[in-house]
Image (cartoon, rainbow, N blue to C red):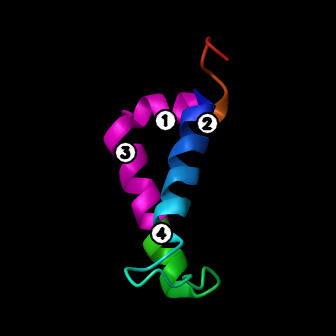
Amino acid sequence: MKNEFRKIVKDTLAEYSYDNDAQVINMTSEYSQDLLAEAIEERIKSKFHIFRINKILTGDSPSE
């Protein structure tokens, strides 16, 4: 299950690492970090219910 989180993060990083002109985006800028954090958060929320996210992150899931 945690691998799904990792995949979401990696896929989002890959998608947001370049702009429309194929220029590398400066991931150290606060604006880029905010944009990336929002995208990751939205993708996780759209895939998982909030209580399920909490169980996965706290290790309370019996499948771990």
Tag 4, which secondary structure? helix
- Above or below, 54 relative to 18: above
Q: Which mark is residue 45?
A: 3
| Dot in front, 3 or 4 | 4
Residue type (three-letter) at the residue carrying disc 3: Lys
Q: Do the residues under discs 1 and 2 have CB atoms within 8 angstroms?
A: yes
Residue position for label 4: 16
User: How far is mark 2 from mark 3, CA to CA?
Assistant: 13 Å
Residue 36 falls left or right of residue 61: left
Which residue is at a point 36% across and 33% down the rendered structure image? 49
Tag 2, which secondary structure? helix
Of callouts 3 and 4, the N-terminal one: 4
User: x and y percent of residue 23 in the render?
Assistant: 51, 85
Of callouts 1 and 3, the N-terminal one: 3
User: How far is mark 1 from mark 4, CA to CA?
Assistant: 23 Å
Tag 3, which secondary structure? helix
Residue type (three-letter) at the residue carrying disc 4: Tyr
Image quarter in which the C terminus is found: top right
Tag 1, which secondary structure? helix
User: How far is mark 2 from mark 4, CA to CA?
Assistant: 24 Å
- Above or below, 8 relative to 52: below
| Dot in front, 1 or 4 | 4
Residue position for label 2: 57
In the current view of this chain or complex, which residue is farthest to the front? 22
Our reading of the magenta stretch's main secondary structure is: helix
User: How far is mark 1 from mark 3, CA to CA?
Assistant: 8 Å
Residue type (three-letter) at the residue carrying disc 1: Ile
Residue type (three-letter) at the residue carrying disc 2: Leu
